[in-house]
Image (tube, rainbow, N blue to C red):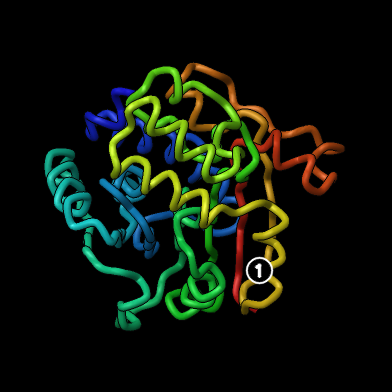
Amino acid sequence: MQARHQNRIIYFKELSTTSKNYFIPYIQQWHPVEKGTKVLEIGCGEGGNLLPFAEMGCNTVGIDIAASRIKEAKTFFHTAHAKGTFIAQDIFLLDKMEWSFDVIICHDVLEHIPHKELFLATLSKFLKPRGIVFMSFPAWQMPFGGHQQICRSKILSHLPFIHLLPTAVFRLLLKVFGEDNDCIQELLSIKQTRISIEGFESLMKNTNLRIQNRKLWLINPHYKIKFGLSPRELNRKIAHIPFIRDFFTTSCFYILTND
């Protein structure tokens, strides 16, 4: 397990940097981000992604099912002298808010959600007519698509592709290396709710949302702050080869709009 998974303020600051340097510029190609822009993040965690939006004068709202994360988000925003509203709630149980949003952010959330089609349909009711959704997730087949980096074992946390093992073998491997039950259950849950590029784009056909843009990354932009690696888009030829591209795509960026 990396230090950022234990010290959440580190993770908060890292996400804030990536959001400022990569998420916002990408979003701005499709929708202005300025003072008064209404921004919602679903699965906001400690709110790191939202901080640079708040610093630009946006009206930011973060929702997360984990009350502990929401508590930290409020603390971190207060420390940063930033304004933001944070709600501990399951998005499926949340009634439509009294306002809609210009920008909705779903960063590394979709792969954790079992009812993906329902989730995507839910996004529409929070989106303004000309609003956009910024969706990002790791392709399941990529080296660390199973989130094994959260393992306490240094060996397992650095082993690529182990999440692609049969479930029984994967579970046994986690137990042999001494992972606790909470970690095992989380990793098995991700294995069960995994999402590929093809799976996502197939789901989109059954929703009111449409893909306006797709950017596949060979080197995830977040790796810049995490590992000092320069972000790099996936080769265009490989990006057009179904299934093969999933093994090389460390992050998928999408811009979605209502019909």
Q: In the picture, residue 145 is in which quadrant?
A: top right
Please report the residue visible at 36 percent of the width from the left and 48 percent of the height from the top: 185
Where does residue 238 sit, x and y in percent of width and height?
A: 82, 37
Front-lying residue, 158 or 224: 158
Please report the residue visible at 69 percent of the width from the left and 55 percent of the height from the top: 213
Q: Secondary structure at mark 1?
A: helix
Question: From this viewpoint, is residue 1 visible?
Answer: no
Question: In this picture, is 56 found above or below 205?
Answer: above
Callout 1: 10 Å neighbours few (<14), some, many (20+)? some
Q: In the drawing, does residue 92 fall left or right of residue 66?
A: right
Quadrant (top left/top right/bottom left/bottom right) for the C terminus: bottom right
Please report the residue visible at 57 percent of the width from the left and 46 percent of the height from the top: 26
Q: In the drawing, does residue 76 fall left or right of residue 14?
A: left
Question: In this picture, is 213 found above or below 146?
Answer: below
Quadrant (top left/top right/bottom left/bottom right) for the N terminus: top left
Q: Residue at label 1?
A: 203
Where does residue 31 sit, x and y in percent of width and height?
A: 55, 59
Q: In the picture, residue 177 is in which quadrant?
A: top left
Question: From this viewpoint, is residue 200 visible?
Answer: yes
Q: In the drawing, does residue 110 fall left or right of residue 83?
A: right
Please report the residue visible at 30 percent of the width from the left and 49 percent of the height from the top: 45
Where does residue 76 sit, x and y in percent of width and height?
A: 17, 42
Front-lying residue, 156 or 63: 156
Where does residue 89 sit, x and y in percent of width and height?
A: 25, 68
- The type of residue carrying mark 1 is Leu
Front-lying residue, 10 or 255: 10
Question: In this picture, is 228 found above or below 167?
Answer: above
